[in-house]
Image (spheres, coloured by chain):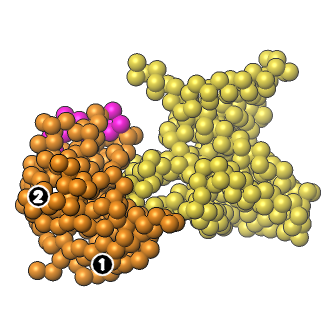
Chain colours: A orange, B yellow
């Protein structure tokens, strides 16, 4: 099976600092790949290079075999690539429902078609389904800025799925979310993965979350991949224990 | 709306003129509110677009062309120039963008003043005729007021549609978090340019009405003061609120005139203090203040 995402020799330097230093890996369709590593190991920079937020210094990124290096984030999104950010990124002045409609509207019709078409861009029902799926029904008409941190985090993740993406890169989805909500988030991600055959790459520090969600894990340290394998293999790798997990 | 239709009756010509000026300035402020309030792009050049519209109207109508031709020309010119002015916004933001647009406003003023072959420079253009529509001459102050009010109604309806459409949502997203918006497929570049182009076009439309309202224009009417005044209208009314420009323009155009009859020397000082207090304690303007009070 062809990989959905191929990363080849990707590098990003900031002056003399090589934040990402020759990283290569593939992500197969339907896979949930975990990306772990200590703070400053280059995980978020790697995401930003893959997703067009930063221009890589070297290397190549392909999605479904198509070179996407240098594409803008909005172009990537239209190719079916979704993402969340490390820090919370919802639109506080829009309601929960409008946040979700916004997250999918640019995939509907042409720009002019959206101007003269329906106010909800035909996404009202899809947004309501997503709200129900993420257990946010009571908050649908609330402004996103008035939600609790955990609820905003759920909304943030839900938004990444509104356009029915093939590949979603999630940057610390579990950060700051309480354990009950976290279990719910894990279930939602598993369900989407199973239903839509959506492929995920997940950066996370919460080991329990990563190990229970991901089918394969990459470990990054100082901009390089130091280990790769199933959660069990990675957890037992002495290099990983030394660099990240500790004894 | 009924109040606006009934308002000019019983007013002296100067009162009707002020009311018409409020209508004309509201249109320009609605445009700036779109660019700044909804899409979050600061512009100190809105006055320049009013100038472009006014000169388009003055030059065409004094040469015998009908006013609707001036509308077409002004809209086309301001859309195109506004689009171009949006390009710097793709690179710089906030006060840097303010300086870029400020330079543009100065450039337009200098062109209006110095290119005498076209604009007659400091002598200005006089005798600008008021339009005739399907045989109905909008020459009297009250008739021209209704003509302006009609255009304001059209502009308001179109803007209402726009801000409630997916475009309006994308503009808000652009203002609140352009990086996230981009990652959700919102073409932030195109929406930024659109916000400038459409906002500027409304400035142009306002100018096309301004010229036949005052019937004599000269460059200083469109210098930086006008741009700052329009910015003040948007901020005082409530940036990002649909009705903000209506209220802001009323405060800026009508209130000083009304207050002037009270205490001549003090009104400007009082007005300035009121604006400063408002901006310091409620940066979201009068409608933001009302919103806060009503929520309690």
Q: Which residue is mark 1?
A: A8
Quarter location, residue B253: top right
Image height check: is B215 above or below A76?
A: above
Q: Position of residue B95 (x, y in %)?
A: 65, 49
| Mark 1 residue element | strand
Label 1: few (<14), some or many (≥20) within 10 Å?
Answer: some
Q: Which residue is mark 2?
A: A236
Tell which of A234 and B174 is nearer to you: A234
Image height check: is B77 above or below B25?
A: below
Same chain for mark 1 and mark 2? The answer is yes
Q: Residue at x 88, y 64 (%)?
A: B114
In the rendered structure, the answer to whether residue B288 lies left or right of residue A206 reads right
Name the quadrant of the C terminus of chain B.
top left
Quarter location, residue B87: bottom right
Query: Magenta span has A170?
Result: no
Query: Magenta span has A140?
Result: yes
Let me know if residue B148 appears in the view.
Answer: no
Q: Alpha-carbon distance for marks 1 and 2?
A: 26 Å
Quick one: label 1 or label 2, which is nearer the N terminus?
A: 1
Tell which of A62 and B261 is nearer to you: A62
In the rendered structure, the answer to whether residue B44 lies left or right of residue A198 reads right
In the rendered structure, the answer to whether residue B80 lies left or right of residue B164 reads right
Q: Residue at x 56, y 52 (%)?
A: B41
In the rendered structure, the answer to whether residue B96 lies left or right of residue A78 reads right
Badge 1 vs badge 2, beta-carbon distance below 8 Å: no
| Mark 2 residue element | helix
Please give the label number shown on residue A221.
Answer: none
Q: Position of residue B211 (x, y in %)?
A: 76, 53
Quarter location, residue B146: top right
Label 2: few (<14), some or many (≥20) within 10 Å?
Answer: few
Magenta range: A133-146
């Amino acid at each position: 099976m062809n990989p959905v995402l191929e990363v080849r020799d990707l590098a990003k330097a900031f002056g003399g600092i090589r934040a990402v230093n020759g990283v290569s890996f593939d992500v197969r369709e339907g896979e949930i790949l975990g990306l772990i590593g200590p703070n400053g190991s280059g995980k978020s920079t790697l995401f930003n290079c893959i997703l067009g937020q930063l221009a890589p210094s070297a290397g190549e990124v392909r999605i479904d075999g198509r070179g996407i290096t240098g594409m803008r984030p909005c172009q990537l999104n239209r190719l079916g690539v979704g993402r969340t950010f490390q820090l919370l990124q919802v639109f506080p002045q829009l309601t929960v429902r409008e946040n979700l409609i916004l997250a999918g509207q640019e995939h509907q019709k042409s720009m002019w078609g959206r101007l003269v078409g329906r106010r909800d861009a035909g996404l009202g029902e899809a947004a309501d389904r997503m709200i129900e799926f993420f257990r946010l029904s009571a908050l649908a008409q609330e402004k996103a800025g008035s939600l609790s941190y955990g609820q905003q985090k759920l909304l943030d993740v839900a938004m990444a799925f509104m356009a029915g993406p093939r590949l979603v890169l999630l940057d610390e989805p579990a950060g700051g979310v309480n354990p009950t909500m976290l279990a719910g988030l894990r279930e939602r991600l598993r369900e989407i993965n199973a239903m839509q055959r959506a492929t995920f790459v997940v950066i996370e520090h919460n080991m329990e979350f990563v190990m229970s969600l991901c089918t394969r894990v990459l470990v990054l340290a100082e901009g390089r991949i130091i280990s790769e394998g199933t959660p069990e293999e990675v957890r037992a790798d002495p290099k990983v224990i030394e660099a990240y997990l500790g004894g | 709306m009924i109040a606006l239709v009934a308002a000019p009756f019983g007013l002296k010509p100067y009162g009707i003129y002020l009311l018409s000026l409020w209508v004309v300035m509201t249109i320009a402020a609605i445009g700036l509110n779109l660019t700044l309030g909804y899409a979050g792009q600061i512009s100190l050049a809105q006055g320049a677009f009013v100038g472009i519209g006014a000169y388009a109207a003055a030059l065409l109508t004094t040469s015998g062309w009908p006013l609707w031709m001036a509308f077409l020309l002004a809209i086309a010119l301001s859309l195109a120039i506004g689009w171009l002015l949006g390009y710097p916004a793709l690179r710089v933001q906030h006060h840097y963008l303010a300086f870029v647009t400020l330079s543009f406003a100065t450039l337009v003023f200098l062109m209006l003043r110095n290119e005498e072959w076209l604009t007659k420079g400091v002598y200005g253009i006089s005798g600008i005729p008021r339009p005739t529509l399907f045989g109905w001459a909008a020459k009297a102050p009250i008739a021209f007021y209704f003509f302006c009010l009609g255009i304001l109604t059209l502009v308001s309806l179109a803007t209402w549609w726009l801000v409630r459409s997916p475009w309006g949502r994308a503009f808000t997203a652009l203002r609140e978090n352009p990086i996230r918006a981009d990652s959700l497929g919102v073409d932030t570049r195109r929406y930024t340019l659109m916000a400038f182009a459409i906002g500027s076009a409304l400035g142009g439309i306002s100018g096309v009405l301004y010229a036949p309202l005052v019937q004599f224009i000269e460059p200083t009417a469109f210098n930086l003061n006008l741009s700052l005044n329009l910015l003040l209208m948007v901020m005082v009314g409530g940036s990002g609120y649909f009705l903000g420009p209506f209220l802001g323009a009323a405060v800026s155009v009508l209130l000083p005139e009304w207050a002037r009859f009270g205490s001549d020397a003090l009104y400007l000082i009082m007005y300035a203090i009121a604006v400063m207090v408002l901006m310091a304690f409620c940066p979201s303007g009068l409608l933001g203040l009302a919103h806060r009070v009503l929520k309690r």
